Image (tube, rainbow, N blue to C red):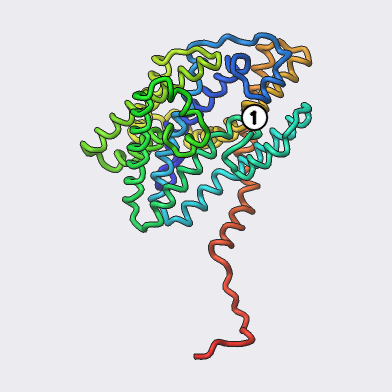
Amino acid sequence: MGDRKGQTVIAIDALRFACAMLVVIYHFGVAYWLSPSPHGAVLLAATGPGFAGTPVARVGWIGVELFFVISGIVIARSAQAGNRRDFLARRALRLAPAAWVCATITAAALATAGLGDIAGAWSRSVAFWPVGVQIDGSFWTLGVELVFYLLVAFALGAGNPRRVERVGAAIGLASALFWLAWLAGGPALTTVPEVRTVQLTLLPHGCFFATGMLIAAIDRGITPARVAALIALTAVGTIEIVQHVHERAAHGVASSAVVAIAIFLAGLVLLLAAARLQPVLARAIDPGTARTIGLMTYPLYLLHQDLGAAMLAALVRAGLSLSAAAAATLIALLALAWLIATAIEPAVRRPLAVAISRFRDPVPDTRPTAFPRAG
């Protein structure tokens, strides 16, 4: 990602890629066999018991929570760069092309593997319809992101950029109240955070978006109120992480909340220090390379779960060991993510950008009218 002036922030792009790899390792290293998606369960039925997973692999899902924090930073900064229409146009160009490409590639692979209900799942995914079966389980986060974008766009429509920070505070407060109610509710509310309609209210994950928005605000200026709010939201985020540990255990993946929280806090520290680390990292990592790695993250995340399962299963059937098949699949997914980020997605984005530009700024009709208005 870049800052408000377009400069690549190396630490954030590196963390974004690390988050994607955490999620990949979670699925490849443990969830494929202990808690697979419906498509993955069919595809991997004949691959054997799979891997038990390391302590880090078992909490690799924490990458999604950090993704939401990064999204909060990106959106808070993007919202300072224009009006509502500009903001929504940038979000559409960032979100849609890669999602369309990845959904289509995955649909082709699943159809080739003989799975059913591909057309409906593909249609929902490319239309960003937030409920129902998606072409890949990872698409669940896109609906949550869209709700967040729309709330920020609403704030921009008020004509006061400072209102964006207030909307972030409201999202964080609502999420904090939700998790306090969850703590007080006990077993009766155990599964509520996983209900799709509840997720789309941002109540379970809003604390992470708000945390990112606060980090962006702190970059503009540190105040006691912002620091206190960041500490409070971080505490709320740890409640969600503990809940998710219990939810994953109920689905067969036992993990450590301590490890998950430690990774999450380390990510927050890196995000807070990103600007100060920039000169040091720029001497070791080319900013262009860092930007490419950051752009690869989105297609890698969208492709890895069910397409990865299809590729892994095919390689095992071809005679590779499970470890060799997993390594080959990961390399292939990384190469495909690079190709999408550097060539395919830009090719899809260009005509979409033209269409959006024409919609936003239509060419005035200069032809004389047959019946000019009187006066």
Q: Position of residue 374 (x, y in %)?
A: 53, 90
Q: Quadrant of residue 262?
A: top left
Asked whether residue 279 appears in the rendered view, the answer is no
Determine the residue positioned at 46% across, 22% down: 244
- Where 351 falls versus 135 (above or below)? below
Most extreme residue toward the front is: 188
361 lies left or right of 82: right
Most extreme residue toward the bottom is: 375
Residue matched to label 1: 335
Circle 1 packing at 10 Å, graded few (<14), some (14-19), many (20+), is some
Determine the residue positioned at 72% across, 19% down: 313
- Where 153 falls versus 281 (above or below)? below
Q: Amino acid at mark 1?
A: Ala
Q: Quadrant of residue 38?
A: top right
Say what secondary structure mark 1 lies in: helix
Depth check, front residue: 51 or 271: 51
Q: Position of residue 121 (x, y in %)?
A: 67, 36
Asked whether residue 244 appears in the rendered view, the answer is yes
Q: Quadrant of residue 346?
A: top right
- Where 160 falls versus 365 (above or below)? above
197 lies left or right of 169: right
Determine the residue positioned at 75% across, 20% down: 314
Depth check, front residue: 281 or 189: 189
Q: Position of residue 300 (x, y in %)?
A: 59, 31
45 lies left or right of 79: right
